[in-house]
Every structure is written in C-alpha cells, then in structure tokens.
Image (cartoon, rainbow, N blue to C red):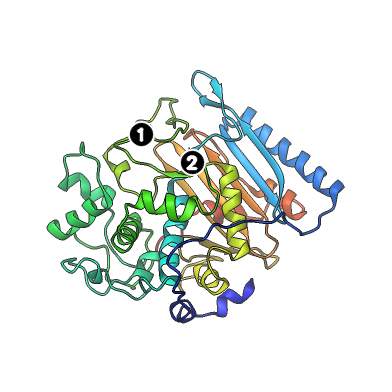
Amino acid sequence: MKRFFAIGIFTLVVACSQKTETAKVNLEEPLNPYDTIAFQQKAKKIETFFETLATKQNFHGTVLISYNEHVLFKGAYGYQDPGKKKHALKLNSVYQLASVSKQFSAAAILKLVEQGKLSLYDSIQKFYPNFPYKNINIKLLLQHRGGLSNYTYFSEKYSDRKTPLTNQGVVEMMIKNNPPVYFFPDRRMDYSNTGYVLLAAIVEKVSGKSFKKYMEEDVFKPLGMKHTHVLDVNNLGDFKYVDAHDKWGAKVRHDYLDGATGDKGIYSTVDDMYKWDRVLHSGKFLSDSTLDSMYMPGSKKLAGPFNYAFGWRTYQLESGEVIVYHGGWWNGFKTFFMRDLENRHSIIILCNNERSNFKNLDPLVDIIYNRKPSANRKFSAYLHHSPGRE
C-alpha cells in the first residue's frame, strides 16, 4: 500500500465509472494465515489491557481488534449508564461515531466521483451559485484546506439555538450572513467541521436525497452494515443507540447542532465498523485507485509523521507501516478507529462516556506488533494529537 504516496489525484478523476447504483457487496472469509497460538496469546494480553482500563480508568465502551483481517479480540466493558452502573454495554451496542463519521462523508463523495456525478475540482458555486467564498473546491474541503470558519461557533450568532440545524440550513446561513473566514483557500490545513457539513450538503444536492437516506440506502445497506445509521434529530426513535454521558456522569441530551451531519452524526457498532474496514480492503466499494487517492496526505508542511487525507488522518510507524486513523469526540461520545493498510490490522474503540480514558494506546500497539515497550515511543501522542495548523 505504500504506492499511494506516488499516485496522483488525477487518476481518480479520469477513472470515473458510469455505474450509478451501489451493488450489494459480499465479503469472503479472510484468507490471510495466522499462528493460532500466537493469536490466542495476543488476545489474552489485549483482554488484560482493556480490563485494566475498565477497572482503573473508568473505561465504558465496546472494542474490536482485528489482525490480518481476522477478529483478534472483541469485548464490551462498563455500562450504558456509568453513573448508576446500570445496563451493561454489549458487543452490539450502537454508538455515535463523532468525527469518525468524516470518513463516510468522504467515501460518499468519492463514490459520486467514480459514478461521474461530480469532480474533486468542482467549486462550491457549481452547487450553490450564491455561495460567497470563492476558489474552494471539493478536494480542499476533504483535506480541511478551505479556510472556512467553524459553524458550531458562528451558528450561535445566526440561529435561535433551539431549532435543529440542517446541512442545507448551514449553507443558507453562510450565504445570508457571510461569516468571516479563518484564511484564504489552500493556504494551510485547519481542521474544519464546516467543510464536512458542506460535503454532506453536496451529497444531498447531487443525489437528490437527504444525507441520511443516501448513506443508508446507497452505502450502509449494500455493504451489509445493518446497524449503521445517520441521526435524524427530529426522529430520534428510528433506531436504537446508547446514551452518552459527560465527565460528571450526566446524560448528554441532543441540541440544535445535532441536526447538521457529515462532520458527525453517524452511529454504528464495532462489528459494522469491522465490516467497513474489510470492505475498504476488498476494493469492492471503491476502486483501488480511488482508495489510494483517499489515503494520500494532503498537506506538505504538517510537522511530524502525521498528515490528513480524505476523511482520514495518516501516520507512518517507525517500522514503516502506513496507517490511517481518526478519533472522535462529541457530546459525551469518544471514538477511535485505526487501520494498518499493509498488514490489515485494525483498532476500533467506541465509548459512551466522556471520562473514558484510552489516551495511551502504546501498550496495545506493542501487543499487536510484537514490540518491546519503550518510554521514548510517542505513538499515542500522534494518534490523539489533532494535526491542525501548518
């Protein structure tokens, strides 16, 4: 998979398919061999790692670790109501993915590109002629290089904070009020929730469906992700999910910001996320050239071995393996998803408690990669760092 650094975005644009519907994807059992005894030993060590988190660091959540595409370990810890210690979390518990949702928004855009319905170089004005900010294309939104200010802040000024936002409503708010930008397009990278709400709005424009309907009908259903949904804040009962809790243990209630999706708002289980991981490895949903482009770092000047691609952060281990990952944190939910593109290992962690502490993943990564612990290794510092500004 190291080849993706050398493959240009142009390949993605010219290789568009005329197919306009997503065919059902069937996955075979993983064929990659593994050592059964070593596999069991790793699983036992991982179990001990998470049991320690649960007993000593207030960890409440569900986890799945895969190794060479095989499920290495899966477990659920803690409670749906951590404060009262009621209703144990389960392996099939459904959580808000928070910013881990961004990779799905990016994938939806890339699928529409493959179908020839849009281009990475389309300007926002192609879809919204009155949009007041020039020289921003889809590619820049995907890479957090558009320079637009954060809608979670400026919407406080331009809304009543009671009526749920919508993706189209955020666009209309920007057209009407022209909130100031952070910087001119493509000057640098700055993590942008606004950009991903705009991407979801463009998916709606191009598909003629709500973001929820498009994702559930054209992405999740064909991929067999039966427990993955987009939140409709006006219809909270259309699927079941666990409640989130703040650092004091109080239940976090939905607010008007939950109406906007694309930057967040997708709910899933560890099993569905594992299925998504395998779908991406299979190349059956997005082509290999599209996937290479999706993982290509977008900024040249970010410090350290991390970067940002299309909905994914990127990182290169000291041993050379390329991984993509993303964390999420929204209204009490904390999430993490890491994928090794070469060895096909993954880490999926979904939590419903803001106090859940899993910042130090070095011992877990040591287990997976058979590494000796090192006090000088700062792997987790990179994974939890938000590479913001160049």
For discs 1 and 2, the disc positioned in front in the rendered view: 1
Instruction: Work out whether 178 lies above or below 98.
Output: below
Residue beneath disc 2: 334
Q: Amino acid at mark 1?
A: Leu
For image coordinates 58% across by 43% down, the residue present is: 270
Q: Under tag 1, what secondary structure?
A: loop
Q: Quadrant of the N terminus?
A: bottom right
Q: Is residue 104 left or right of residue 39?
A: left
For image coordinates 32% across by 38% down, the residue present is: 233
Residue beneath disc 1: 236
The image shows residue 315 at horizontal and vertical percentages of: 57, 63
Q: Is residue 330 visible?
A: yes
Viewer-proximal residue, 308 or 171?
171
Q: Amino acid at mark 2?
A: Lys
Q: Is residue 198 left or right of residue 58?
A: left
Q: Is residue 89 left or right of residue 232?
A: right
* Snapshot quadrant of residue 214: bottom left
